[in-house]
Image (tube, coloured by chain):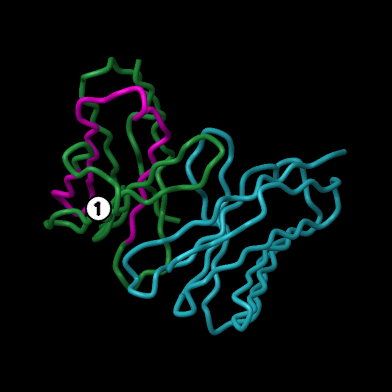
Amino acid sequence: GEDVEQSLFLSVREGDSSVINCTYTDSSSTYLYWYKQEPGAGLQLLTYIFSNMDMKQDQRLTVLLNKKDKHLSLRIADTQTGDSAIYFCAEIHSSASKIIFGSGTRLSIRP
Amino acid sequence: GAVVSQHPSRVICKSGTSVKIECRSLDFQATTMFWYRQFPKQSLMLMATSNEGSKATYEQGVEKDKFLINHASLTLSTLTVTSAHPEDSSFYICSARASILNTEAFFGQGTRLTVV
């Protein structure tokens, strides 16, 4: 079946790196995404990675994919207060017909 | 990125009435639109997938007669919550993709529905 799992909370100190982890079960996933949701708002696509890639970097964001372990991570370098949000990991179903989301990780920043 | 506009952003309605939520792709044609529901502090639950010009495909457990979805054009999909009840209160979010080959899904800002 389809399942995407994330830890619910992460707290980091401002300026440190944040690492948000995600595991998925569908081995035929073709694309994996990271979305950011600020309070009361919709979702903002942060980045995505093809399943045949190991890593993707985009400014402060680094995505690592371990396809063997079905593990995806998002690293945010130099975390700022504006990074406080819920981060959703998502995969596109193998039939490309729908996107399945994880539970979301609430990232909080402490001074 | 492309823009998806969802309207209204907030709505309060009385029990028993129906509410329509619109989702528009403003600068691209969306062959596929998705409707999600989000309960407080929970993830998004896919309700249905709609392709332009055809009937929506509902996920298991979602009542199609309760949540009517219309995708009449390539830029507009609507979700109508019929005979709303307080348990239908939730955050509803739509998403649109340009084509089945397109990797990105663009999201609306969501609609906070409160049924009193």
Viewport quadrant of the C terminus of chain B: top left
Q: Name the residue under label 1.
A: B58
- The chain coloured cyan is A
| Residue type beneath disc 1 | Tyr
Q: Quadrant of residue A22?
A: bottom right
Q: In this view, does B22 lie above or below B89?
A: below
* Residue placed most toward the observer, A92 or B25: A92
Q: Position of residue B27 (x, y in %)?
A: 32, 52
Q: Residue B48: x and y, percent?
A: 28, 52
Q: Which of B49 and A36 is in front in this view?
A: B49
Identity of the residue drawn at 31% across and 47% down: B26
Which image quadrant for residue B1?
bottom left
Q: Is residue B22 magenta?
A: no
Residue at (41%, 48%) from the top-left corner? Answer: B45
- Decide whether residue B93 is among the magenta residues: yes
| Helix, strand or loop under label 1 | strand
- Please state the horizontal and vertical placement of residue B17, each as a whole percent of the image: 21, 20
Please tell me which residue is depicted at 33% across the width and 60% down the height of the picture. B97
Provide the chain ID for the residue under circle 1: B
Q: Which chain is green in the rendering?
A: B
Q: Which residue is drawn at 73% across and 62% down?
A: A75
Characterize the local packing of mark 1: few (<14), some (14-19) or many (20 or more) Cα atoms within 10 angstroms. some
The mark tally for this picture is: 1
Q: In this view, does A81 lie to the left or right of A24?
A: right
- Majority secondary structure in the magenta region: strand
Q: Is residue B8 left or right of residue A30?
A: left
Would you say B3 lies left or right of B76 here? Answer: right
Residue B99 position within the rendered picture, expressed as x and y whole percent measured from the top left: 29, 67
Q: In this view, does B115 lie above or below A13?
A: above
Q: Please report the bounds of the magenta region as a residue range.
A: B69-97
